[in-house]
């Protein structure tokens, strides 16, 4: 069975968040809910030398991530009603008729993909823009990206084209849920272990 | 609105879209995924529906210079979601004109509950924001009567058509110039808030301000960028950010960025970051020049053939034999007898001497090398000197006028078929520098040619008495020193009448005497051509997406009514409505460019792209190829490293204390710079920057953008710790001009001693009370003191202190 996934090119991404805002527009999401997050991740420190000059070893990169429609999703395992399910194309989505809004999915997902929309009483999340994909289009975030840093398709094709890297801080280890995500690593990837999330207030 | 306009307004999705080869989203069939509930998860426009959803072309008309395309999906006369360009194969060179996060959020602006909906007149004090609804007839009368009265009493030099950039459609805002010019014109203005210093300075060096298309970086070996951050400022997908990405991906040049901030350009494009104290870029350049000259890395042939003023041999007669050449100055043989060594520059810039030497060797040996600057370095108190100095690096190394090089100026690109509605000429020849308009209100008749940059007359004869402000937030929010500006504007005996058109009650709109509810550009016939867009130009034509809501009217329809009251309607309108004017202007453009699609074709296709037939725009290429046949527009026809024209200005102008203009393109300390004694009181330098959340102040009230990119003060951990400030705490930023309260983002991405906040956040203060700005508007803290040459805005030169609240 086909398994769809995303490609993210961290070398092209500038952290502009067009993906996130295009998604919010298309899916009509409020400020407090995002299906796609853009992490600013970085580190480095400053020190003053004996001439009073500042030296530094700063680095930063951006990482745009939505639901990765995992092959071994955490959210479906904890869902007590079966509302959270893996459907055709391997896309993970919510059956609103079954969802009771308990929030286990949101708590379990290491990518923060599902959220409980308290105003509606059920979970919401990225469904890979299933309706668009069905119509032969890419998800709206992919089509919106000004840097062409996102792609979507059968994950086997993506991995063949872009490699199978799926681990990049601050994402959890990929062996936990087997995300269908192929990452082109940023130029600063080698320093990822030294960094931290720099924009926690922007993550919802 | 005529019938033709309505019938052309859009097309039913599915028919015309299919003709463009675009698949239709949100259809009812769902075979791949069966009848799961996933379709129900979609909201708004994507719900399966049979009701007609129309798609209209338009563009995001704000002033980031992206001019990106939009396709607005409309149902039941409401915009329900916004797509951008999805036509063609998106192959680079014929790529889609994709909007950024701002354009993608325009629905929230169009449908915003706080939009202005009715005409209003002021009832409180100016700036209080108290208004009362009036009828349109009252509004037309009020505008016509006040305009006529002020024209009669003070003459057209008292009229000011305010600098504004909220609407950049070619066919909308210029109706105001047409209207004013027909009534005797107005006090002219020169320079902008964006680029006044570089625009004033570079003509003394090159005869013009010009740069290569940044797509040409594909031909570069090394790219050095001073304060250039178009990755964030011009984020659209057909603008410089995408061209830079592709040029580097395909060409592989090394990138060095010089900036006090580890900007998004540094983070995502740079091989090396050189943090530098704001306002000291020219000192770095001087020292790089010292190394280039010492190590014989300069292009002697280029300097001899194309330039004057490099060394004694090429000095103009008036300056010969006085050790006034560039080389003499740099090497310590000039009047100051100081060699501009890397050690000298280290003390000014904070950049290590060995880093400077290494940079010089890289610039001197990489062929070709592209030197660019953003507009940040020039928007400072010594910005004219900085802008010109940066250009010395390509001049010294012969990288001007060639592929893979650049002039050292900011971005340029390929343009075609720009137009505006016919505005006629402004009969008034007197001009002032744009930024000095508050001076012209407050003490206009004291302003002179030699002290204040008045042009066309030796002094102003009348102050500004009336302001027309269409779609601009530069009355307060985007001007400087808001608290002082507030005082000047509150005195109704000075400026007697202010009319403002806008879509929101912006901070500037609060100063209106008459406040008129505008339509968005996408709600009226609209046209735009690209600004900076590398080597692929484009035009976009759009039609009104919905009918006008509430009592909102176009600028044109308002001016037509006022013109009627002033007895000149026929002359103003020539019998055309908005759509007829658009068609007229477009057909005029087609007469000069027959390859343009027909008007009807443009209505259907919305966008038209054209690649630069020359490959990439190369500035001054004609001059480089044949300097005799194609001299520059400088007095000598050559690159004037030493400018006699500037020497004349130095000798004749009345410069304020601390203002420096040098005939050479070299470092000059700026007022309120890092070495100003004021740093004992306000130790932190605070440049602003252009933030992804907004284009200037446009989109500043859109909640999803404010959440995604909150307004914060960048402060280095070193400076935060010494003040007891933790990340995420509210701090106050203050100087003698005002106080801002804002969240602190404690980040290593900024040089110690420097803090920064994005410009354009909406000013939010009790102006009858403590005047503390809790909106985070940088212009609460910026200065009204104009720069030496351009008499322009030094908005990135600010000294402040930061304290925990």
Image (tube, coloured by chain):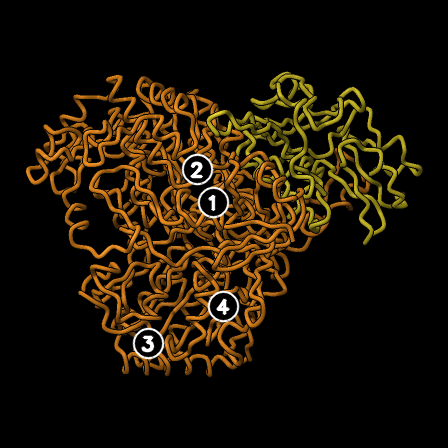
Chain colours: A yellow, B orange
Which of marks 2 and 4 precedes in the sequence? 2
The label number, if any, that marks residue B509 in the structure image: 4
User: Which residue is identified by label 2?
Assistant: B277
Which quarter of the figure has residue B675?
top left
In three-dimensional space, the C-alpha distance between marks 1 and 4, rounded to whole angstroms, equals 30 Å
In three-dimensional space, the C-alpha distance between marks 1 and 3, rounded to whole angstroms, equals 52 Å
Which of marks 1 and 2 precedes in the sequence? 2
In three-dimensional space, the C-alpha distance between marks 4 and 3, rounded to whole angstroms, equals 27 Å
Q: Residues within 10 Å of mark 3 (few under 14, many from 20)?
A: some
Residue B542 versus residue B724 in the image, above or below: below
Return the chain for callout 2. Answer: B
Q: Which quadrant would the C terminus of chain B be assigned to in this image?
A: bottom right
Seen from the viewer's position, the closer of residues B801 and B248 is B801
- Same chain for labels 4 and 2? Say yes or no: yes
Q: How many marks?
A: 4
Which of marks 4 and 1 precedes in the sequence? 4
């Amino acid at each position: 069975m086909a398994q769809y996934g995303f490609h993210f090119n961290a070398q092209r991404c500038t952290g502009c968040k067009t993906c996130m805002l295009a998604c919010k527009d298309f899916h009509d999401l409020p400020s407090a809910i995002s299906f796609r997050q853009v992490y600013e991740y970085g580190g480095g420190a400053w020190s003053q030398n004996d001439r009073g000059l500042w030296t530094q070893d700063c680095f930063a990169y951006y990482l745009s991530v939505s639901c990765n429609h995992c092959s071994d999703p955490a959210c479906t395992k904890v869902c007590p009603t079966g509302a959270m399910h893996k459907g055709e194309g391997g896309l993970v989505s919510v059956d609103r008729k079954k969802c009771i809004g308990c929030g286990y999915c949101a708590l379990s997902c290491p990518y923060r993909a599902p959220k409980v929309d308290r105003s509606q009483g059920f979970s919401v999340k990225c469904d890979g823009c299933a309706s668009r994909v069905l119509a032969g289009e890419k998800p709206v975030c992919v089509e919106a990206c000004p840097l062409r840093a996102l792609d979507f398709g059968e994950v086997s094709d993506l991995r063949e084209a872009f490699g199978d890297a799926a681990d990049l801080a601050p994402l959890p280890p990929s062996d936990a849920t087997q995300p269908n995500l192929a990452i082109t690593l940023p130029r600063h990837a080698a320093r990822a272990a030294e960094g931290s999330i720099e924009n926690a207030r922007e993550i919802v | 609105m005529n019938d033709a306009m309505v019938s052309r307004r859009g097309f039913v999705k599915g028919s015309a879209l299919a003709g463009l080869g675009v698949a239709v989203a949100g259809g009812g069939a769902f075979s791949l995924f069966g009848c799961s509930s996933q379709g129900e998860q979609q909201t708004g426009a994507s719900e399966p529906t049979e009701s007609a959803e129309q798609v209209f072309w338009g563009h995001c008309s704000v002033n980031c210079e992206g001019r990106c395309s939009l396709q607005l999906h409309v149902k039941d006369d409401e915009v329900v979601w916004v797509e951008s360009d999805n036509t063609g194969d998106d192959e680079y060179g014929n790529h889609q004109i994709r909007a950024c996060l701002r354009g993608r959020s325009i629905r929230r602006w169009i449908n915003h509950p706080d939009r202005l909906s009715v005409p209003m007149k002021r009832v409180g004090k100016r700036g209080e924001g108290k208004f009362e609804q009036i009828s349109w007839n009252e509004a037309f009368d009020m505008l016509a009567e006040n305009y006529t009265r002020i024209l009669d009493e003070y003459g057209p030099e008292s009229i000011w058509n305010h600098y504004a950039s909220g609407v950049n459609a070619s066919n909308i805002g210029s109706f105001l110039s047409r209207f004013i010019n027909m009534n005797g014109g107005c006090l002219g203005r020169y320079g902008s808030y964006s680029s006044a210093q570089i625009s004033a300075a570079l003509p003394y060096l090159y005869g013009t301000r010009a740069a290569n298309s940044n797509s040409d970086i594909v031909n570069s070996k090394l790219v050095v960028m001073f304060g250039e951050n178009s990755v964030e400022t011009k984020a659209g997908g057909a603008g410089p950010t995408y061209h830079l990405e592709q040029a580097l991906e395909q060409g592989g040049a090394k990138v060095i960025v010089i900036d006090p901030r580890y900007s998004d350009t540094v983070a995502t494009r740079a091989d090396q970051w050189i943090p530098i104290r704001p306002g000291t870029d020219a000192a770095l350049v001087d020292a790089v020049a010292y190394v280039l000259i010492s190590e014989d890395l300069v292009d002697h042939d280029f300097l001899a053939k194309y330039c004057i003023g490099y060394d004694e041999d090429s000095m103009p007669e008036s300056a010969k034999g006085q050790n006034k050449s560039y080389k003499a100055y740099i090497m310590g043989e000039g009047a100051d007898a100081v060699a501009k060594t890397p050690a000298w520059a280290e003390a000014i810039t904070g950049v290590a001497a060995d880093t400077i030497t290494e940079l010089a060797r890289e610039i001197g040996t990489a062929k070709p090398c592209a030197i660019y600057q953003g507009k940040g370095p020039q928007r400072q108190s010594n910005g004219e000197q900085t802008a010109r100095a940066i250009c010395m690096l390509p001049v010294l190394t012969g990288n001007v006028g060639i592929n893979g090089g650049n002039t050292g100026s900011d971005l340029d690109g390929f343009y075609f078929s720009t137009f505006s509605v016919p505005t006629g000429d402004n009969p008034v020849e007197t001009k002032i520098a744009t930024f000095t308009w508050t001076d012209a209100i407050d003490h206009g008749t004291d302003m002179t040619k030699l002290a204040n940059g008045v042009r066309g007359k030796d002094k102003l004869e009348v102050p500004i008495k009336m302001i027309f402000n269409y779609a601009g937030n530069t009355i307060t929010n985007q001007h400087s020193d808001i608290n002082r500006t507030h005082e000047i504007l509150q005195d109704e005996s000075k400026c007697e009448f202010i009319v403002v058109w806008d879509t929101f009650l912006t901070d500037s709109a609060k100063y209106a005497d008459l406040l008129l509810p505008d339509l968005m550009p996408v709600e009226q016939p609209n046209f735009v051509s690209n600004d900076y867009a590398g080597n692929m130009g484009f035009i976009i034509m759009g039609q009104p997406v919905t009918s006008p809501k509430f009592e909102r009217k176009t600028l044109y329809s308002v001016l037509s009514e006022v013109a009627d009251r002033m007895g000149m309607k026929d002359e103003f309108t020539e019998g055309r409505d908005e759509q007829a004017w658009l068609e007229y202007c477009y057909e005029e453009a087609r007469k000069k460019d027959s390859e343009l699609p027909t008007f009807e074709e443009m209505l259907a296709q919305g966008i038209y792209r054209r690649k630069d037939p020359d490959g990439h725009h190369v500035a001054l290429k004609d001059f480089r190829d044949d300097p005799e046949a194609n001299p520059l527009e400088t007095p000598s026809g050559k690159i004037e490293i030493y400018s006699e024209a500037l020497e004349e200005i130095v000798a004749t102008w009345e410069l304020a204390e601390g203002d420096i203009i040098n005939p050479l393109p070299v470092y000059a300390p700026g007022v309120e710079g890092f070495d100003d004694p004021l740093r004992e009181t306000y130790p932190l330098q605070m440049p602003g920057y252009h933030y992804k959340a907004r284009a200037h102040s446009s989109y500043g009230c859109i909640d999803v953008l404010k959440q995604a990119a909150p307004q914060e003060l960048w402060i280095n951990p070193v400076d935060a710790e010494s003040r007891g400030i933790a990340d995420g705490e509210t701090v106050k930023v203050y100087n003698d001009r005002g106080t801002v309260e804002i969240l602190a983002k404690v980040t290593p991405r900024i040089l110690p001693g420097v803090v920064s906040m994005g410009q354009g956040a909406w000013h939010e203060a009790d102006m009858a009370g403590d005047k503390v700005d809790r909106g985070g508007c940088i212009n609460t803290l910026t200065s009204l003191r104009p720069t030496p040459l351009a008499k322009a805005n030094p908005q990135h030169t600010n000294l402040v202190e930061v304290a925990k609240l």
